Protein backbone atom coordinates (compact mmCIF):
# COMPACT_ATOMS: atom_id res chain seq x y z
CA UNK A 1 0.00 0.00 0.00
CA UNK A 2 2.81 2.34 0.80
CA UNK A 3 4.45 1.73 -2.50
CA UNK A 4 1.18 2.27 -4.31
CA UNK A 5 0.54 5.60 -2.53
CA UNK A 6 4.03 6.69 -3.24
CA UNK A 7 3.67 5.87 -6.91
CA UNK A 8 0.32 7.60 -7.20
CA UNK A 9 1.36 10.71 -5.36
CA UNK A 10 4.67 10.99 -7.16
CA UNK A 11 3.20 10.55 -10.62
CA UNK A 12 1.83 14.07 -11.03
CA UNK A 13 5.05 15.62 -9.83
CA UNK A 14 7.02 13.51 -12.26
CA UNK A 15 4.64 14.23 -15.10
CA UNK A 16 4.77 17.98 -14.36
CA UNK A 17 8.52 17.94 -14.34
CA UNK A 18 8.62 15.85 -17.49
CA UNK A 19 6.10 18.06 -19.21
CA UNK A 20 8.00 21.16 -18.31
CA UNK A 21 11.37 19.80 -19.25
CA UNK A 22 10.11 17.99 -22.32
CA UNK A 23 8.27 20.99 -23.81
CA UNK A 24 10.76 23.69 -24.72
CA UNK A 25 8.00 25.94 -26.10
CA UNK A 26 6.17 25.93 -22.81
CA UNK A 27 9.31 26.65 -20.86
CA UNK A 28 10.14 29.40 -23.32
CA UNK A 29 6.71 30.96 -22.89
CA UNK A 30 7.07 30.83 -19.13
CA UNK A 31 10.51 32.38 -19.30
CA UNK A 32 9.62 35.08 -21.74
CA UNK A 33 6.03 35.69 -20.61
CA UNK A 34 6.57 38.71 -18.32
CA UNK A 35 8.92 40.52 -20.74
CA UNK A 36 6.33 42.12 -23.09
CA UNK A 37 4.53 43.73 -20.15
CA UNK A 38 7.81 45.15 -18.91
CA UNK A 39 8.68 46.53 -22.34
CA UNK A 40 5.24 48.11 -22.69
CA UNK A 41 5.59 49.67 -19.28
CA UNK A 42 9.02 51.06 -20.07
CA UNK A 43 7.81 52.49 -23.40
CA UNK A 44 4.89 54.21 -21.66
CA UNK A 45 7.29 55.67 -19.13
CA UNK A 46 9.54 56.92 -21.94
CA UNK A 47 6.59 58.58 -23.70
CA UNK A 48 5.44 60.16 -20.46
CA UNK A 49 8.93 61.49 -19.86
CA UNK A 50 9.12 62.87 -23.39
CA UNK A 51 5.76 64.63 -23.03
CA UNK A 52 6.79 66.08 -19.70
CA UNK A 53 10.00 67.36 -21.23
CA UNK A 54 8.17 69.02 -24.11
CA UNK A 55 5.67 70.56 -21.73
CA UNK A 56 8.52 71.90 -19.64
CA UNK A 57 10.06 73.49 -22.71
CA UNK A 58 6.85 75.14 -23.90
CA UNK A 59 5.29 76.20 -20.60
CA UNK A 60 7.61 78.36 -18.64
CA UNK A 61 4.82 79.96 -16.67
CA UNK A 62 5.87 78.27 -13.45
CA UNK A 63 8.83 80.63 -13.22
CA UNK A 64 7.61 83.98 -11.95
CA UNK A 65 9.02 86.88 -13.93
CA UNK A 66 10.29 89.62 -11.67
CA UNK A 67 9.28 93.23 -12.13
CA UNK A 68 12.89 94.16 -12.79
CA UNK A 69 13.22 91.76 -15.71
CA UNK A 70 9.94 93.05 -17.19
CA UNK A 71 11.22 96.61 -16.97
CA UNK A 72 14.52 95.67 -18.57
CA UNK A 73 12.98 93.73 -21.43
CA UNK A 74 9.79 95.66 -22.21
CA UNK A 75 10.03 99.25 -20.99
CA UNK A 76 13.66 100.30 -20.84
CA UNK A 77 14.56 99.69 -24.54
CA UNK A 78 11.81 101.96 -25.98
CA UNK A 79 12.52 104.59 -23.34
CA UNK A 80 16.20 104.58 -24.28
CA UNK A 81 15.28 104.93 -27.96
CA UNK A 82 12.99 107.90 -27.19
CA UNK A 83 15.69 109.57 -25.11
CA UNK A 84 18.21 109.13 -27.92
CA UNK A 85 15.84 110.65 -30.48
CA UNK A 86 15.08 113.64 -28.24
CA UNK A 87 18.79 114.13 -27.55
CA UNK A 88 19.69 114.15 -31.24
CA UNK A 89 16.74 116.45 -31.93
CA UNK A 90 17.84 118.88 -29.21
CA UNK A 91 21.43 118.89 -30.48
CA UNK A 92 20.24 119.60 -34.02
CA UNK A 93 18.02 122.45 -32.82
CA UNK A 94 20.79 123.92 -30.65
CA UNK A 95 23.36 123.80 -33.47
CA UNK A 96 21.48 126.52 -35.41
CA UNK A 97 21.42 124.47 -38.59
CA UNK A 98 17.94 125.89 -39.19
CA UNK A 99 16.10 128.87 -37.69
CA UNK A 100 13.91 128.21 -34.67
CA UNK A 101 10.72 128.70 -36.63
CA UNK A 102 11.82 125.92 -39.02
CA UNK A 103 13.34 123.48 -36.52
CA UNK A 104 12.04 124.14 -33.01
CA UNK A 105 13.46 122.25 -30.06
CA UNK A 106 11.66 119.58 -28.03
CA UNK A 107 10.79 122.09 -25.31
CA UNK A 108 8.98 124.38 -27.78
CA UNK A 109 6.96 121.44 -29.08
CA UNK A 110 6.10 120.39 -25.54
CA UNK A 111 4.85 123.92 -24.80
CA UNK A 112 2.57 123.70 -27.83
CA UNK A 113 1.04 120.44 -26.54
CA UNK A 114 0.75 121.91 -23.05
CA UNK A 115 -1.08 124.97 -24.39
CA UNK A 116 -3.68 122.80 -26.16
CA UNK A 117 -4.14 120.81 -22.96
CA UNK A 118 -4.64 123.93 -20.84
CA UNK A 119 -7.07 125.33 -23.41
CA UNK A 120 -9.14 122.15 -23.10
CA UNK A 121 -9.02 121.44 -26.85
CA UNK A 122 -6.46 118.63 -26.99
CA UNK A 123 -8.77 115.74 -26.10
CA UNK A 124 -11.43 117.04 -28.48
CA UNK A 125 -9.00 116.95 -31.42
CA UNK A 126 -7.89 113.43 -30.53
CA UNK A 127 -11.44 112.14 -30.00
CA UNK A 128 -12.65 113.52 -33.33
CA UNK A 129 -10.00 111.56 -35.21
CA UNK A 130 -10.29 108.38 -33.12
CA UNK A 131 -14.08 108.25 -33.48
CA UNK A 132 -13.83 108.71 -37.24
CA UNK A 133 -11.11 106.09 -37.51
CA UNK A 134 -13.00 103.57 -35.35
CA UNK A 135 -16.24 103.96 -37.30
CA UNK A 136 -14.49 103.75 -40.66
CA UNK A 137 -12.54 100.69 -39.52
CA UNK A 138 -15.70 98.94 -38.26
CA UNK A 139 -17.44 99.48 -41.59
CA UNK A 140 -14.29 98.31 -43.39
CA UNK A 141 -14.34 95.07 -41.39
CA UNK A 142 -18.02 94.56 -42.19
CA UNK A 143 -17.26 94.94 -45.91
CA UNK A 144 -13.81 93.36 -46.12
CA UNK A 145 -14.63 90.14 -44.24
CA UNK A 146 -17.35 88.78 -46.57
CA UNK A 147 -15.43 90.10 -49.56
CA UNK A 148 -12.32 88.20 -48.45
CA UNK A 149 -14.31 85.00 -47.91
CA UNK A 150 -15.84 85.34 -51.36
CA UNK A 151 -12.46 85.84 -53.01
CA UNK A 152 -10.90 82.99 -51.03
CA UNK A 153 -13.59 80.39 -51.74
CA UNK A 154 -14.87 81.22 -55.24
CA UNK A 155 -12.28 80.75 -57.97
CA UNK A 156 -14.08 82.92 -60.52
CA UNK A 157 -14.30 85.82 -58.08
CA UNK A 158 -10.63 85.45 -57.16
CA UNK A 159 -9.62 85.48 -60.81
CA UNK A 160 -11.80 88.54 -61.43
CA UNK A 161 -11.09 90.86 -58.50
CA UNK A 162 -8.15 89.30 -56.67
CA UNK A 163 -5.56 91.31 -58.65
CA UNK A 164 -7.68 94.45 -58.26
CA UNK A 165 -7.65 94.09 -54.47
CA UNK A 166 -3.87 93.71 -54.48
CA UNK A 167 -3.55 96.80 -56.67
CA UNK A 168 -5.85 98.84 -54.44
CA UNK A 169 -3.84 97.81 -51.41
CA UNK A 170 -0.66 99.21 -52.96
CA UNK A 171 -2.36 102.45 -54.06
CA UNK A 172 -1.65 105.39 -51.71
CA UNK A 173 -4.85 106.40 -49.97
CA UNK A 174 -4.18 110.09 -50.54
CA UNK A 175 -4.80 109.50 -54.25
CA UNK A 176 -8.49 108.97 -53.48
CA UNK A 177 -8.96 112.31 -51.71
CA UNK A 178 -9.42 114.56 -54.80
CA UNK A 179 -11.87 112.10 -56.34
CA UNK A 180 -13.81 111.75 -53.08
CA UNK A 181 -14.08 115.54 -52.75
CA UNK A 182 -15.55 115.75 -56.26
CA UNK A 183 -17.96 112.89 -55.55
CA UNK A 184 -19.15 113.89 -52.07
CA UNK A 185 -17.96 117.45 -51.49
CA UNK A 186 -16.40 118.62 -48.22
CA UNK A 187 -18.46 116.30 -46.03
CA UNK A 188 -17.86 113.42 -43.66
CA UNK A 189 -18.71 111.06 -46.51
CA UNK A 190 -15.48 112.10 -48.23
CA UNK A 191 -13.40 111.16 -45.19
CA UNK A 192 -15.12 107.82 -44.67
CA UNK A 193 -14.88 106.95 -48.37
CA UNK A 194 -11.11 107.45 -48.29
CA UNK A 195 -10.84 105.35 -45.12
CA UNK A 196 -12.87 102.51 -46.65
CA UNK A 197 -10.91 102.51 -49.89
CA UNK A 198 -7.69 102.30 -47.91
CA UNK A 199 -8.68 99.66 -45.35
CA UNK A 200 -11.04 97.23 -47.11
CA UNK A 201 -8.43 95.76 -49.52
CA UNK A 202 -6.00 95.08 -46.65
CA UNK A 203 -8.62 93.33 -44.54
CA UNK A 204 -9.88 91.24 -47.46
CA UNK A 205 -6.38 90.24 -48.55
CA UNK A 206 -5.45 89.31 -44.99
CA UNK A 207 -8.42 86.96 -44.76
CA UNK A 208 -7.63 85.46 -48.17
CA UNK A 209 -4.06 84.76 -47.01
CA UNK A 210 -5.34 83.18 -43.80
CA UNK A 211 -7.78 80.90 -45.66
CA UNK A 212 -5.08 79.86 -48.12
CA UNK A 213 -2.93 78.66 -45.21
CA UNK A 214 -5.61 76.35 -43.75
CA UNK A 215 -4.61 72.67 -44.09
CA UNK A 216 -7.11 70.84 -46.36
CA UNK A 217 -7.48 68.21 -43.63
CA UNK A 218 -9.34 70.74 -41.47
CA UNK A 219 -11.94 71.35 -44.16
CA UNK A 220 -12.38 67.62 -44.83
CA UNK A 221 -12.77 66.96 -41.12
CA UNK A 222 -15.38 69.70 -40.91
CA UNK A 223 -17.37 68.20 -43.76
CA UNK A 224 -17.12 64.77 -42.13
CA UNK A 225 -18.79 65.99 -38.94
CA UNK A 226 -21.45 67.86 -40.91
CA UNK A 227 -20.05 71.42 -40.95
CA UNK A 228 -21.14 72.79 -44.31
CA UNK A 229 -22.16 76.19 -45.62
CA UNK A 230 -22.40 78.88 -42.95
CA UNK A 231 -21.52 76.39 -40.20
CA UNK A 232 -18.30 75.52 -42.00
CA UNK A 233 -17.37 79.20 -42.26
CA UNK A 234 -18.24 79.90 -38.64
CA UNK A 235 -16.78 76.82 -36.94
CA UNK A 236 -13.93 75.77 -39.27
CA UNK A 237 -12.89 78.40 -41.79
CA UNK A 238 -12.75 81.58 -39.70
CA UNK A 239 -11.19 79.98 -36.57
CA UNK A 240 -8.52 78.24 -38.65
CA UNK A 241 -7.78 81.43 -40.63
CA UNK A 242 -7.74 83.64 -37.53
CA UNK A 243 -3.96 84.36 -37.39
CA UNK A 244 -3.87 85.58 -40.98
CA UNK A 245 -7.18 87.39 -40.59
CA UNK A 246 -5.90 89.17 -37.48
CA UNK A 247 -2.80 90.28 -39.36
CA UNK A 248 -5.09 91.70 -42.04
CA UNK A 249 -7.14 93.52 -39.41
CA UNK A 250 -4.01 95.01 -37.89
CA UNK A 251 -2.81 96.21 -41.27
CA UNK A 252 -6.32 97.41 -42.08
CA UNK A 253 -6.32 99.63 -38.99
CA UNK A 254 -2.96 101.08 -40.00
CA UNK A 255 -4.34 101.88 -43.45
CA UNK A 256 -7.49 103.34 -41.89
CA UNK A 257 -5.48 105.67 -39.66
CA UNK A 258 -3.20 106.81 -42.48
CA UNK A 259 -6.12 107.30 -44.86
CA UNK A 260 -7.96 109.32 -42.23
CA UNK A 261 -5.02 111.65 -41.71
CA UNK A 262 -4.65 112.17 -45.47
CA UNK A 263 -8.36 112.94 -45.83
CA UNK A 264 -8.39 115.33 -42.87
CA UNK A 265 -5.34 117.16 -44.19
CA UNK A 266 -6.82 117.85 -47.62
CA UNK A 267 -10.58 117.85 -47.05
CA UNK A 268 -10.45 120.60 -44.45
CA UNK A 269 -13.59 122.57 -43.66
CA UNK A 270 -15.04 124.27 -40.55
CA UNK A 271 -18.21 122.20 -41.01
CA UNK A 272 -16.25 118.96 -40.59
CA UNK A 273 -14.92 119.70 -37.13
CA UNK A 274 -11.25 119.63 -36.24
CA UNK A 275 -9.39 116.36 -36.06
CA UNK A 276 -5.65 115.88 -35.86
CA UNK A 277 -5.25 116.17 -39.63
CA UNK A 278 -7.14 119.46 -39.81
CA UNK A 279 -5.22 120.68 -36.77
CA UNK A 280 -1.92 120.03 -38.52
CA UNK A 281 -3.11 121.88 -41.61
CA UNK A 282 -4.16 124.84 -39.46
CA UNK A 283 -0.72 125.01 -37.87
CA UNK A 284 0.88 124.84 -41.32
CA UNK A 285 -1.28 127.72 -42.53
CA UNK A 286 0.09 129.90 -39.72
CA UNK A 287 3.67 128.58 -40.22
CA UNK A 288 3.67 127.23 -36.66
CA UNK A 289 6.25 124.48 -36.92
CA UNK A 290 6.05 123.70 -33.20
CA UNK A 291 2.34 122.97 -33.61
CA UNK A 292 2.97 120.86 -36.72
CA UNK A 293 5.53 118.70 -34.92
CA UNK A 294 3.31 118.48 -31.85
CA UNK A 295 0.45 117.17 -33.99
CA UNK A 296 2.74 114.64 -35.69
CA UNK A 297 3.76 113.35 -32.26
CA UNK A 298 0.12 113.10 -31.17
CA UNK A 299 -0.78 111.12 -34.30
CA UNK A 300 2.15 108.78 -33.63
CA UNK A 301 1.20 108.31 -29.97
CA UNK A 302 -2.43 107.49 -30.82
CA UNK A 303 -1.40 104.95 -33.47
CA UNK A 304 1.09 103.23 -31.17
CA UNK A 305 -1.32 103.30 -28.23
CA UNK A 306 -4.14 101.58 -30.13
CA UNK A 307 -1.76 98.90 -31.36
CA UNK A 308 -0.36 98.24 -27.88
CA UNK A 309 -3.71 98.30 -26.10
CA UNK A 310 -5.80 96.32 -28.57
CA UNK A 311 -4.10 94.57 -31.47
CA UNK A 312 -0.89 93.34 -29.81
CA UNK A 313 -2.63 91.63 -26.83
CA UNK A 314 -5.20 90.07 -29.16
CA UNK A 315 -2.49 88.83 -31.50
CA UNK A 316 -0.49 87.30 -28.63
CA UNK A 317 -3.58 85.57 -27.30
CA UNK A 318 -4.46 84.05 -30.66
CA UNK A 319 -0.91 82.88 -31.36
CA UNK A 320 -0.50 81.44 -27.87
CA UNK A 321 -3.78 79.52 -28.13
CA UNK A 322 -2.41 77.83 -31.26
CA UNK A 323 0.96 77.01 -29.75
CA UNK A 324 2.72 79.54 -31.98
CA UNK A 325 3.89 81.70 -29.10
CA UNK A 326 5.38 80.55 -25.81
CA UNK A 327 4.40 82.49 -22.73
CA UNK A 328 7.46 84.14 -21.25
Image (spheres, rainbow, N blue to C red):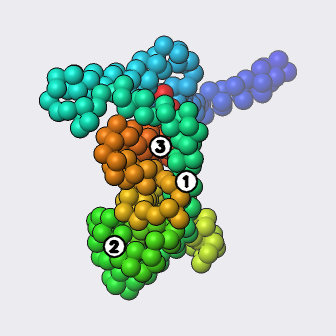
Which residue is label 2 attached to?
178
Classify mark 1: residues with Cα within 10 Å, few (<14), some (14-19) or many (20+): some
Query: Relative to the observer, which residue lies in front, 102 or 8?
Result: 102
Query: Relative to the observer, which residue lies in front, 69 or 232?
Result: 69
- For numbered disc 2, what is the local secondary structure? helix
Image quadrant where residue 29 sits: top right
- For numbered disc 1, what is the local secondary structure? helix
Could you tell me which residue is drawn at 31 percent across and 40 percent down? 289
Counting every numbered tag in the picture gives 3
Foreground disc of the pair 1, 3? 1
Which badge, 1 or 3, comes first in the chain's sequence? 1
Which residue is label 1 attached to?
128
Could you tell me which residue is drawn at 61 percent across and 67 percent down? 234
Query: Relative to the observer, which residue lies in front, 96 or 314?
Result: 96
Classify mark 2: residues with Cα within 10 Å, few (<14), some (14-19) or many (20+): some
Could you tell me which residue is drawn at 43 percent across and 50 percent down? 279
Image quadrant where residue 30 sits: top right
Left or right: residue 266 compared with residue 233: left
Above-or-below relation of 132 to 284: below
Which residue is label 3 attached to?
302
Which badge, 2 or 3, comes first in the chain's sequence? 2
Task: Please identify the residue farthest to the front as the structure is shown.
Answer: 286
Task: Specify the label residue 102 is tagged with.
Answer: none
Could you tell me which residue is drawn at 46 percent across and 19 percent down? 71
Foreground disc of the pair 2, 3? 2
Left or right: residue 279 compared with residue 64: left
Where residue 43 appears, as percent x and y from the top left, is: 50, 33
Amino acid sequence: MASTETGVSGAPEASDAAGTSGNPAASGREASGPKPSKSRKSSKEDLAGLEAGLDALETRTAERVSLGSVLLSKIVPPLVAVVLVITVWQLAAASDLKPDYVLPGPLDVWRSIEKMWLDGTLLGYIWTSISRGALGFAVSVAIGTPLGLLVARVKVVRAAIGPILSGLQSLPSVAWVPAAIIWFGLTDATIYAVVLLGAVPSIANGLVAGVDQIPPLYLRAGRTIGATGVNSIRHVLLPAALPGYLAGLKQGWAFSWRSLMAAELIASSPDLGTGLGQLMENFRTYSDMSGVLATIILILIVGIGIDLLFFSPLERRVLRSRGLLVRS
